[in-house]
Image: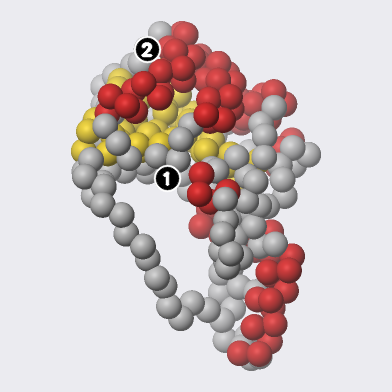
Amino acid sequence: MVTSLEFRLYPVAEVCSGFAYFPIEAAADTLTAYRTWIEDAPDAISTAVVLRRMPDDEGTPAAVRGRHVVMIKVLHAGPAGEARRLLAPLWRAASAHGGPLLDELRATTFAASSMGGTPARHLDLFDSVGDEVIGALLRAAEQAQTVEVRHWGGALGRPGPDAGPVSRRSTRLSVIVDTVVPGLAGELRPYANGGSFLNFMADTSRTAAAYAEADYERLRRVKRAYDQDGFFRIGHVTR
């Protein structure tokens, strides 16, 4: 139960935001480069690599309409030129098979920026991503509409005192798949860190995985004290 929220705001005059699209043949090279590139990525840049089957409709740009692509999503709190410099190694890997097919990165205001999202029919968190995981994701992309690999870390991975019950702060990457792919969960399970994140999780049987064990026990004590009748029982609730 949330009774209050406190936000600290920061002035951000300009950001660089948008998507760039590359041929799907670059997927393996891009994901391999991405797991190394994130190690030096500053907190000011947020990225994701997405393997996606683009819609074949008039609302999709002609350059990528109906194509299976590698999409790099970017939101950088700084000038576009600085974002391009930071992204250069990743761009080189993604361009190994031609491209970009379409580059929509641009300077804009924070209010007008967007990274979009992927419906999470499957979610796993990873402290590291090896070749076995990349291989599983490439196979999943043959069946799924969207496979998204998103960089975590930053301030989330450096919690201060009383930082709340979010667990698995060591997480470096999340994998979200918008389609149920038979066998994928079993392939990824040996390499995932076992955690989860409520915002991206549809499976309410895994709610406890989003918390550290001690934090979840504290939430259970609150539940027993204030909701003995189980009034709050829909969605991600403490059991």
In the depicted structure, whether residue 201 falls above or below residue 236: above
Q: Position of residue 102 (x, y in %)?
A: 30, 20
In the depicted structure, whether residue 154 falls above or below residue 19: below
Instruction: Report the residue marked by disc 1.
Output: 117
Callout 2, which amino acid?
A: Gly
Question: Along the line of sight, which residue is nearer the eye, 18 or 63?
Answer: 18
In the depicted structure, whether residue 86 falls above or below residue 239: above
The dot on residue 99 is 2
Left or right of residue 218, residue 6 in this image = left
Q: Residue furthest right?
A: 190
Callout 1, which amino acid?
A: Gly
Looking at the rendering, in which quadrant would you find the C terminus?
Answer: bottom right
Q: Position of residue 184 (x, y in %)?
A: 69, 37
Rendered residue at 58%/68% (across/down): 162
Rendered residue at 71%/42% (across/down): 192
Q: Position of residue 44 (x, y in %)?
A: 40, 39
